[in-house]
Image (tube, helix red, strand yellow):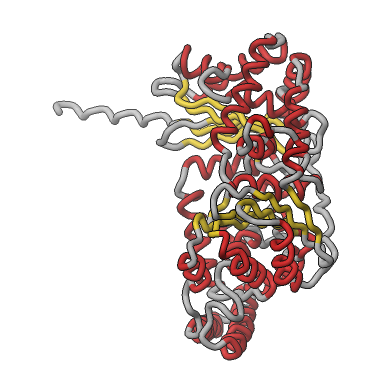
Amino acid sequence: MKTAVKPTLAMLCLALLATLPLAAQDLASIEKRVTVHKMKNGLTAVIYERPEAPVFSFFTVVDAGSVQDPKGMTGLAHMMEHEAFKGTDKIGTTNWPAEKAALARLEVAYAAYRAELDKTTGRDEKKLAQLEKAFNDARAAADKFVVKNEFSKILDSNGAVGVNAFTANDETGYFYSFPSNRLELWAYLESERFLHPVMREFYTERDVVYEERRMRTDSSPIGRLVEQFLAAAFTAHSYRNPPVGWPGDLKNFSATDAMNFFKKYYIPSNMVVGVVGDVKAAPTIAILEKYFGRIPSGPKPPEYATSEPPQSSERRVVLREATQPIVIEGYHRPNYRDPDDAGYDVLADLLSRGRTSRLYRSLVRDQKIALQAQGFTNFPGVKYAELFAFLLVPNAGHTPEEIIAAARKELDRLRNEDVSDEELASVKTRAKADIVRGLKENDNLAEGLAEAQLRFGDWRELFRHVDRIDKVTKADIRRLANKIFVPENRTLAFIENPPKPEAAPRKGGE
């Protein structure tokens, strides 16, 4: 499974436009294809009829991501995503009653082992070794009942394509595509893993996630830089925590902790399902009710409360490593519900969308001091106050300080000079064209519909956001640049090469 950074709302909102003939690109025509159905248990489904090919895609989004990780258990939401592919009480086991009892004994053994391991004084090393052995024995006993990867094998044997999931800061998403004649099988399988989850092979999978973190973060210069950048940019809000989890936490939480997380957040009122493709609304709703309607209802979990305090001074992180220098610079901005959200999207496009963007033209093409120069918003999420950030990669022979200064000149231009009407128009056209080229498939539409329904309670916000992008003015761009691109709102992180050690002087006569 993959941990992902979500695309901007602007990218999602234009996906729907990309799939329709030009003559049908109006909201009234699209409304005829879309049906929204809310079940009694609270789950919402958005169905888009698109019968061009005998396939469909779905996207299930859970309104819980790494931000909801309990204190001391970062990475738990990500673990739950992994466990969702381990099967159910019917799939992935040779004997569920016996496995259930073995898993219960495993949790008792792990709790005893952790209790002794966590002692700060008076820890009995001999007892600890005995408890560790008992834990490993219990794990091996539970594993005897496992049919490995049975859930995924069922999907593969029935023609599933693109089976995957992600854990982001704001949410967790599950998706794949199926032949249309497998709609009922999909509904059964997808609902079963949320109705009867099993924390199977949990501690083995936890080790897998730990190794994933080691490869993607601890052994990756850009991974280490991003992690430390976010930890500096956010002092209170959980956006500072990596979705994959901190190393110490990944050795701490249990299968019981994961099940408690599931029971709190994986409830129908906290989920939206998007279905797009060769389906009809009425029979699809009947199938959804038959299977997803079995999931018990519950109140939507309370919203995360801690907000990030205003930043009042520049923050700086410097990693000195013998690797490619990289720069990340970020500025705090409001969340996706801010009236200026579309303006930030246009600002990002203006700075870095394509080879005619300002950063590319100045730093890469003209000055040739950068290999890469781009800006992006909605980082690391959209649900809470976030960052407008820049990623800059110096060319050979150029330093981070040099490329930082050049990029800030472009920001100063935006603060002090209006963009031209022609430039703003071309930026909007280019942004839409880029998105249309990239988002033409059922799976992207399912994600876009589910996202909009989850965040706004109305999938039509896809189109309303497009309208807001078109209304962004030159004055808006200048106003927003002056609002956020200021030193006291800045967090800077970069990798620079350490100075080369001086050669030792030769001894006389050598």
98 relative position to 399: left or right: right
Is 342 above or below relative to 2? above
Outermost residue, left side: 509
Name the residue nearer the viewer: 22 or 94: 22
Query: What is the quadrant of residue 194 in the picture?
Result: bottom right
Q: Is residue 385 visible?
A: yes
Vertically, is 197 above or below 451?
Answer: below
How far across and down, in percent of the image, does residue 38 sit?
81, 59
Q: Nearer the viewer, residue 70 or 94?
A: 94
Q: State the residue at coordinates (52%, 58%).
A: 163
| Residue located at (69% from left, 10% from top) | 421
The image quarter containing residue 479 is top right
Q: Number of marks in the image?
A: 0
> How far across and down, in percent of the image, does residue 441 sit?
56, 44
User: Which residue is pictured at 59% across the width and 55% down the height?
Assistant: 56
In the image, taking residue 379 as reference, residue 219 lies left or right, namely: left
Question: In the drawing, does residue 191 fall left or right of residue 247?
Answer: right
Tell me the quarter of the image containing the C terminus.
top left
Which residue appears at 48% of the width and 62% of the height? 159
Relative to 300, residue 125 above or below: below
Q: Nearer the viewer, residue 80 or 31?
A: 31
x, y (%) of residue 262? 70, 68
